[in-house]
Image: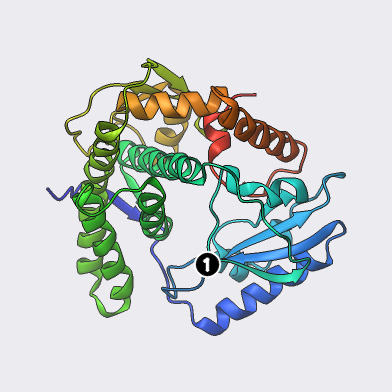
Amino acid sequence: MTNRRLILERQPRFIPLSDYGRAAAEIDGLLESMPGVVAVYRIGSVSAPGISDLDRVAVVEKSGRFPTVWGRLSENTRYVAMHSPFLVDVETFVRHRWFAVAEPLELVAGTQFVLEAPPSSELLGAIAGIEGLVVSRLKLAKQLCIGRIKVRPFLCEMHNLRHDLRLMGASAAEAPRAWALTAEVLAVRGGWWDAADHERDGRVIELASSAPIAIDEALARWSSTTAETATVDALPLSTDWANITLASQAIVSMAPQGGGLSPLMGRVSRRAAEFVWRHERHQLALPPAVVSLLSAAAAGADELLAERLEVVQRYKSFLDAQDPGWSSIGLAGIFTSG
């Protein structure tokens, strides 16, 4: 069902490929000239001009504090890029496949590193895929709760679902709604500039309203195929999501409005809703097997997960020591305390 009460903001504006080229050159130049940077990598490509963002990774020596370059970029470059570059130390970058799968990855400048291939990469990839789906679900829940969809970031986030579903090992037969959603996202992104404004708005609202149920189905279907594990009742989150707890609950379906969080839509203004949302505690219900797996990864429950946790915590400590304004590669830190 279409939710006409949602407010759409941060609508895309058309960006020619030449502007992407200039923005990339500006970011790359700043990163390459920064003391301590040993390599700059790009992730992905511009598949939908005006909607696509720019992903850059600055690989640095671990010692030292690195001031963010975000405020030094031109306003147009910040708009094109949409988010700050990722900062990662050499040791973590070489081992980042333990907790993140950044593909396709291409060297822009500096040292070409040989990346470590961890054991049980299928399991570690599945954890990273589930973390990606859960964070997408959290972002959707928050936006539906507040009643506002940030259109361009939303379309980028939904585009990443394909990557997470593949990592999780969910086929179209196992997660039909989620894969149908990814096909619709591709169609919306590809036909954005040929559609009328009202048509674009309607399709975004339909996507936002159907996406939570599609993600819930994918997580529930994955959960149903896993071996029995000890149930963990709840997992508190960290970083920007520290006001959220993941709660174990067998899910058949979930209503898209509110997404399981305290409904704020229509109660207060946008800024007030954001403030209230950040200062209230919320729970998001997920299948028990999903919460148990994420909890096991966050606790380093066996030798493999303990090594993964060590890489994640070391990287988290490195980022905590840096100036704010850098992006984090991977999402595992959200599920890990300390």
Colouring style: rainbow
Query: Would you identify the image quadrant in which residue 309 lies?
Result: top right
Front-lying residue, 292 or 283? 292
Asked if residue 106 is positioned above or below residue 139 in the image, the reply reads: below
Image quadrant where one finds the C terminus: top right
Instruction: Return the x and y of residue 52 as percentages of the image width and height.
Output: 46, 68
Query: Would you identify the image quadrant in which residue 321 lies?
Result: top right
Asked whether the viewer can see residue 205, the reply is yes
**Direction from residue 288 to residue 119 in the image, left or right:** right
Report the residue at 72% width, 33% height from top.
Answer: 317
Instruction: Return the x and y of residue 181 as percentages of the image width and height.
Output: 24, 56
Asked whether the viewer can see residue 329, the reply is no
**Direction from residue 102 to residue 180 in the image, left or right:** left
Instruction: Return the x and y of residue 74 as percentages of the image width and height.
Output: 67, 68
- Element under disc 1: loop
Front-lying residue, 82 or 174? 174
* Number of residues whose C-alpha sits closer than 10 Å to that of mark 1, classed few (under 14), some (14–19) or many (20 or more): some
Instruction: Return the x and y of residue 206 as percentages of the image width and height.
Output: 20, 54
Q: Which residue is mark 1?
A: 44
Asked if residue 25 is positioned above or below residue 142 in the image, the reply reads: below
Report the residue at 69% width, 39% height from top.
Answer: 315
Asked if residue 206 is positioned above or below residue 44 in the image, the reply reads: above
Query: Would you identify the image quadrant in which residue 332 lies?
Result: top right
Find the residue positioned furthest to the left: 1
Find the residue positioned furthest to the bottom: 18
Q: Amino acid at mark 1?
A: Gly
**Direction from residue 279 to residue 149 in the image, left or right:** left
Front-lying residue, 53 or 44? 44
The image shows a total of numbered marks equal to 1
Report the residue at 61% width, 35% height from top.
Answer: 308
